[in-house]
Image (cartoon, rainbow, N blue to C red):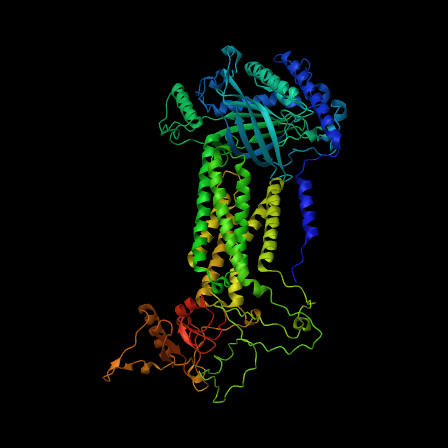
Amino acid sequence: MPPRQQTGASFAFVMLMIWLLMPMGDIGGQTGPLLSVIAARRLAKYRDALEVLNGTDWGDFAPTKKEGPTFVNMTGFREVDGFAWDDLADFQSRSVQMSRRAVGSEADGPPLWDTAEGEPVWMTASGSLEGDWVYRQASARRSYESYNLSNSVPDMDWIGDRIDWGRNLTGSSGRMHLHMEGNKTATEYEQLPRDQAPLSGGSIRNVKAALSLEDTTGSQSTWEMRLWGVHWPRQGVIMMTTTSEKFDGIIGLPHLTPGRDFFQSSKALLKERLNKVLETKEKNLYNDQTVPWSSEIQSNPQFLLSPAPQCEYVLYAQVHPPDWGRLGRGVDPKDNLARAKLIGAIENELAAPQGAPVGHIPRLRMSAILYSPDCGFFIESKGPPDFAPGEFNHLEGVKAEVQTHRIKTWLLIFACVVFGQVFLLKNQMKETFTPSTMGRVSFGTVSAMVMVDGITFTASATWVSTAGATFLPTMALMFAAFLSMTIGGSFLAKIYEVQFPENHPRSEPSTNTAPSPAPQPTAFTSASLLPGPVTASGRVGGLPPPPPPQQQPVFVPFDGVVVDDRPDITNGAAAVPGRAMLATPPPASPRQNFQAIIGRFILSSLVISFVTLSSSTWYPSARAVYLDVCAFAYLSMWVPQIYRNAMRNCRRALTWPFVLGQSVLRITPIAYFWLKVDNFLFAQTSPHAFAALAAWVWLQIVLLGAQDILGPRFAVPTGWVPEAWDYHPVLREDNVEAGGLPIGLLAADEQQQQNADGTARPRRSSSSSSSSRSAAAGEKAKQGGGSLHVIDCSICQEILEVPVVRAGGDDDGGVASVFARRLYMVTPCRHIFHTACLESWMKFRLQCPICREDLPPL
């Protein structure tokens, strides 16, 4: 009967996926107008805060002033908000000291960074950086119990304000990842005189960044946020903040800068840019309710309804000068003017390539300090002078243009890897094109490859829509994965069609008539060497065989699968013309069953993809374990083939170029992400886990090689596998009288034939290598009391030398004996052939080349 379709479970799974992927909304038709009203209030609140910024000056926000603290009327900067601004002066002082250490100065001279005369740094800070951070507690410890948000921000319906806030780090150290995006154009201005130091450098641009903090030694959580701020290119200073309903960070940022010149330049830039953003949002209020400058990675208008409080951050970062010895072509300019021109030329070439020889691009390096004014702690990047330079180097990464080039290069490499998989698969399909050879290949092994290729195709097809500069390499990877998936799927369909009768045996319909006695199955056993002798006349032991029953002939096609199309005479309905049969419905076809399996593969791939994407928010240790388990399951692709070889007693189902090539190609992407520290996904490396995975793949290859050389059931207990015919038995002389030796096997001294004139004529040998191996085996057999017998192979018509163990002796089981038995194959009908000859024959027919008896599959 056809397999039962799990319609209810599939429908429930689809509904669950739709519910998870659809945006939240439980207010029905009132959601749109309500969100517009709330968004309008937020924009009006930002407009008021911007007006406050326009009317303030440097020093108006001084929460630690001895004469009396002063505040400004912006959310988070008011006294009623209760933020821990007691450490603001310490934050500014440590930021300035960090910048002075990063930019070199003369030993006895004043700090050159204060007057914007230090070493030139990268003018554009766009790029991806990562490094370790260390935690430092502020002077005032704060928690959610220190605040009353209903009093400070009364117009918000807060959720979770009486529990531990999000982004609250508790560990002593962790990992930080910073992805910077800066505006390409910078605004020039006139800086203050030298006596107003520290100076800002005379140019400024707006920037934004995505920050990820892993609390490795604390809660094991990973917090992601978006920061907005400004960048002073000449000084290499970057200041950014988070912005939320309880903190107007981006608007009050000028009051957090380290000096008056920084305040005035950032105030002028933000007043212009923020005003433009507010005007655009106010015009498109009913079409776009997203909040500007939100600290959420994915800003959703629904967050306006019930926001959740989280710790706020103020970031100060200093860009370090590049490694002058490795910049460009290795020439180190001595004066700052020449260095600035060299940096400008390199950045212009990276932004708009013209073919100029820029040489090696040094890594982008920053030192950073983060201050949380509401949760009361500091986070500083690990590096000199507090930590050894060789162990920690603050935040390191590459510029955005270099990162894009690396991504394109590695995507093209991965596309070539997948094309190599397609090439190997096509060659394997040329070798495995008959039902006999397809019956040896494991369905599970090919399924694992096709499923991963499908996931690769889905991922690249999803990425290509937003690829941007990496569009063409992503398209190449998608096309290669599509070819590998479709070609592998067609090969899988053929394998399933051939193996369908094996996995779905035909069942007879139930009738009221008495069942006929079932014939006893004939099992191929290796207890005795061979069955009784079979002659052309069909006599066994001189007695004629019993007459066969009268029955219709059974046709055997070329692949050896017996097809019996005779009608079932025990079914009375079948004997009555025009009578409908009340039997069970016919079984489903292989095509229908294969389509159902493909549907399960697709659902499984979707589940794996969703879980993998969601694992980015898991604890780092749990995510690492999950990815290692997925890689282990994927790289276990040869286990089903090893199992099928043992169960069917077959070997050489797949060619060695295919096994070795696929193993190397499919472990290459895993090696990239598990070993390369600066991989483009910034995945945490795990060399020990990769070493275990590589050893596991190598062990599977060794097992396949052992099955090929020593036999498919090498070291497998007999009771674990079904009985199967052994094509490479140990031949003994004491089976001659019992008729157990293959037909026509002669002794070694009879291997010469007579010519017409009575002279001896030697037989032909099949090959020099096989002759040498046979001679070595014969010498070993003679030393053990055996002999060397010969016979003509009926397929190639060349001599076959077979070692035979003496009567009463035993095979030593050595390597030479195993290799000698691999040179010949004995059929159940007691005919013997070269192994290569009979294996090539059985690719097309599972019948004996001499007597046409059916042969067990390899």
Q: Residue at x 69, y 25 (%)?
A: 245
Q: Nearer the viewer, residue 145 or 577?
A: 577
698 is higher (above) or lower (below) than 268: below
Task: Give coordinates of residue 172: x percent, y percent.
Answer: 61, 36
Q: Quadrant of residue 380?
A: top right
Query: Does residue 65 show up?
Result: yes
Residue 273, image quadrant: top right
Q: Indicate whether 496 appears above or below 243.
A: below
Percent position of residue 414, x then y: 46, 44
Whether residue 394 can be seen here = no
Image position, residue 338 (x, y; %): 38, 20
Most foreground residue, 360 or 454: 454
Quarter location, residue 308: top right
Q: Is residue 385 above or below residue 636?
A: above
Q: Position of residue 315 (x, y in %)?
A: 58, 26
Task: Point out the image quarter for the N terminus.
Answer: bottom right
Q: Nearer the viewer, residue 692 or 529?
A: 529
Foreground residue, 562 or 223?
562
